[in-house]
Each structure stands twice: as structure tokens, then as C-alpha cells.
Amino acid sequence: MNEMETLVSELKAAHADGKDAIELALLARDKLGAGFRAVPFIASFRLAFDIPLTVLQRAQAWERFGLGSVHISDEEFTSLLSPWLTMREESSGPEGRIDRTD
């Protein structure tokens, strides 16, 4: 298993344990260390959570990353990613069935 596959597995496990967007992003940054850049962040979240590229391109401007001159707040970062992170929690029950009544 390469570094990216390991990170993706750890992100999925942390999400299953209830970690939020901020905690997941900080985990990715900590695991990648000096290798943390916009592309590895985007790739890991895309692979782990199937978040659209355009959303992740905006999210990489999060102020805690310091990856450029334009920054977004914790609230905007969380809001951007929450549809994909909460959708996984709500969409399937214990046997993988859909629980929504839309």
C-alpha cells in the first residue's frame, strides 16, 4: 500500500469514527507532513469521499493550510465539505440500505 492509499484508508476510518471536516483535513496534513500540498490534499479527499474537484479546489484555500494568499474560514471549509461528509453518514443504515424517505 502506498502513502496515498494509506492516507485514504485512514481518512475513511477517521470519518467512520465521527471525525468532522476539520479533523479530517488536519489528519491529512499531519500524515503528509512536508509532502502536504494542494494536490495531495485534493487527491486524498477525492479518493476517500468522492468530493467534486471544483469543491476541493475551493477548500484547499482553508486558512489553516496556508496554501496561498486567498483564505477561507473554518466555517466555509466545513460548509463546503459537509454535503459529502454528512451524506455518507445519513444515506445508509446498518445493512447498507437507504434510510431516506424523499
Image (cartoon, grey):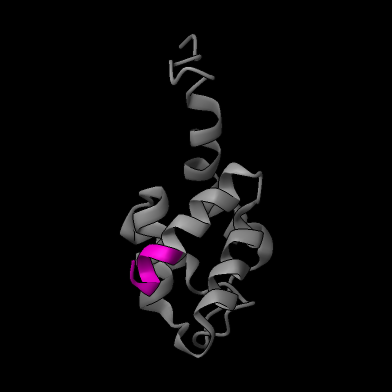
Q: Residue at x 49, y 50 (%)?
A: 12
The quadrant in which residue 24 appears is: bottom right
Question: In the picture shown, does residue 44 fall above or below 85?
Answer: below
Judge from the rendering whether residue 15 lies leftward or rightward of residue 74; answer left or right: left
Q: Residue at x 50, y 14 (%)?
A: 99
Residue 27 appears anywhere in the view:
yes
Q: Position of residue 41 (x, y in %)?
A: 43, 71
Residue 57 appears anywhere in the view:
no
Q: Nearer the viewer, residue 36 or 80?
A: 36
Q: Residue at x 41, y 53 (%)?
A: 48
Question: In the picture shown, does residue 25 fall above or below 90?
Answer: below
The quadrant in which residue 39 appears is: bottom left
Question: In the picture shown, does residue 44 fall above or below 12?
Answer: below
Q: Nearer the viewer, residue 11 or 89?
A: 11
Question: In the picture shown, does residue 96 fall above or below 40?
Answer: above
Judge from the rendering whether residue 88 lies leftward or rightward of residue 48; answer left or right: right
Q: Name the residue furthest front.
A: 1
Q: Main secondary structure of the magenta part?
A: helix
Magenta span covers which residues? 1-6
Q: Position of residue 63 (x, y in %)?
A: 62, 77
Q: Nearer the viewer, residue 10 or 45?
A: 10
